[in-house]
Amino acid sequence: MSRKPYSTPRSWSELLSVTLERKVEVRFGHARRQVIVVQDKGHVLAVRMNAIFGEAPLGVAESVAKWMRNGRRARQACRRLDAWIAEIEPRLKPGREVRLRSQGEHFDLSPMMEALISDEFRRIEFKNPDPKITWGRRSSSRPRRSLQLGSFDPETGVIRIHPVLDQAAVPHFFVRYVVFHELVHAALGDEPAGPTGRRPHHGPLFRRAEEAYADYARALEWQDDNIRDLMRSARTGKPMKAPKKTNMPQLDLDLASQQLFLF
């Protein structure tokens, strides 16, 4: 059986980057409700698609590229894409059960999240499923220019926090801010897509909610002062030393060349 032309995230990334003439990063997942989601992060288009797109025929791959470039204006491409998604829907597998581990060596994430929900989100009705939280796994890869501190999976409702934050040198208020950031994603869901079908990752509603958080400025200041030490700790597995001040300029969460990513 011949291999499909776009069977890996890398091949999809290359196709879409060439077609759209900008950087596109694709990752495969197992989402059943939103089998393909596009988020414009300014410096890159982040695409999350169900792994079954690795089996997509050439015509479907071309339709995805046209939809991303022209949105619903690409009517023929959208019809073909919708028809293929309807065809493969019965084959979509449920995601694996997630084992939750909220208690770390220095921080317990569950009471931190529950306190935030009771305080900052007390008037918010979260979209199903209700958020759950766990420490993520330490990666065997060696991060160099980026570090994903947290993520929210809308399919399972699971928030994952990078284990590099579970150490004595990281203040409680900063871990709490990262949890808050992911809870905002859980509360807002995906913001409305623009005319091209792209959804802003941190759109106006998100930014307003985040900037209203009491410790927002203090958390960003700590991040800016300790970014290099935090990334070094994630890369080497060695704990951070006592925080030290630097004269680094303020960094945007998503646009700095050496940066921390919060998803």
Image (cartoon, rainbow, N blue to C red):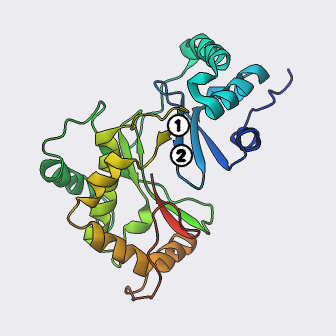
Tally of numbered discs = 2
Q: Position of residue 122 (x, y in %)?
A: 13, 45
Residue at horizontal 27 percent and vertical 52 percent from the top = 209
Q: In the picture provided, is 215 more to the left or to the right than 98?
A: left
Residue at horizontal 64 percent and vertical 22 percent from the top = 74
How far apart are labels 1 and 2 at the CA level? Answer: 6 Å
Discs 1, 2 touching: Cβ within 8 Å: yes
Q: Position of residue 9 (x, y in %)?
A: 69, 40
Image quadrant occupied by the N terminus? top right
Q: Position of residue 80 (x, y in %)?
A: 66, 14
Q: Amino acid at mark 2?
A: Asp
Q: In the picture provided, is 91 more to the left or to the right than 248?
A: right
Residue 198, numbered circle: 1
Residue at horizontal 52 percent and vertical 67 percent from the top = 259
Depth order, front residue of 189/74: 74
Q: Is residue 5 above or below residue 123?
A: above
Q: Quadrant of residue 185?
A: top left
Depth order, front residue of 235/178: 178
Q: Residues within 10 Å of mark 2 (few under 14, many from 20)?
A: some
Q: What SS does tag 2 mark?
A: strand
Residue at horizontal 18 percent and vertical 40 percent from the top = 124
Report which residue position mark 2 lands on: 40
Q: Amino acid at mark 1?
A: Arg
N-terminal of the two: label 1 or label 2?
2
- Viewer can see residue 238: no
Q: Is residue 213 above or below residue 67?
A: below
Q: Position of residue 109 (x, y in %)?
A: 28, 56
- Viewer can see residue 236: yes
